[in-house]
Image (tube, grey):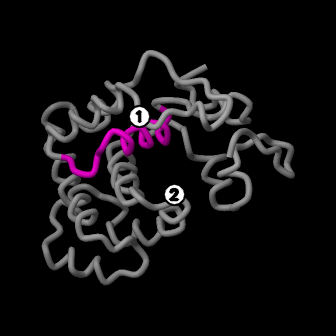
Amino acid sequence: MEGIIIGDDGLARPLWASSDPLMREYYDTEWGLPVRDEQGLYERISLEAFQAGLSWATILRKRPAFRAAFHDFHPETVAAFTEADVERLLQDPGIVRNRLKIRAAITNAQATIALRAEGGLVDFIWQFQPASTPEPVTYADVPTTSPESIALSKALRKKGFAFVGPTTMFALMEAIGMVDTHLVDSHRRGTSGVWR
């Protein structure tokens, strides 16, 4: 998992995005592009939490079922979920059936709504964008946390969010383009519009 693989289309991608068509599509069209809407950020926080301890490929395969189960991650709808909804979701084979993570998604929907009084989730998260981004040549060069992801984790916890540890928040920052950890030789490096 060191560096870059040249695909049959001639494009350079990391190993994780080279073989599985679903991961390749996600890498080419979505990962690392800015997300600046509340529902989109809430969905990504939720999915990153469900991913903890699992592979992203697993979450990506289950994403359509997650979106159905959580009403496209509409914060008001999920915030109103009851214990009966938790029990219903625990019976849904299409998603990751983890009681703590399901409850965290509900808690985080409520916290997302509460943040609106302070300017909203988008501004809250993006204020932690660092002044510079890593320039990894190999996967060994890609950090798993940063001072900003640690600070974001602490700040979100203070606002009532759950399953938002520093490593999970760094993965979020990568996924939404707040940092660019595309390997330097990747065809996607610098495509976010956030970093040049």
Expressed as whole percent of the image width and height from the top left, the position of residue 60 reads 52, 62
Question: Quick check: 11 left or right of 125?
Answer: right
Q: Which residue is mark 2?
A: 56
| Mark closer to the chain start, 2 or 1 | 2
Contact between labelled residues 1 and 2, with CB atoms less than 8 Å apart:
no
Residue 119 found in image quarter: top left
Classify 166 as above or below 84. above
Q: What kind of residue is marked 1?
A: Thr
- Name the one closer to the observer, 166 or 17: 166
Q: Is residue 138 magenta?
A: no
Q: Quadrant of the C terminus?
A: top right
Classify 24 as above or below 127. below
Question: Quick check: 112 left or right of 192?
Answer: left
Expressed as whole percent of the image width and height from the top left, the position of residue 173 reads 43, 36
**The magenta stretch spans which residues?**
161-177
User: Foreground mark, 2 or 1?
Assistant: 1
Q: Which residue is mark 1?
A: 145
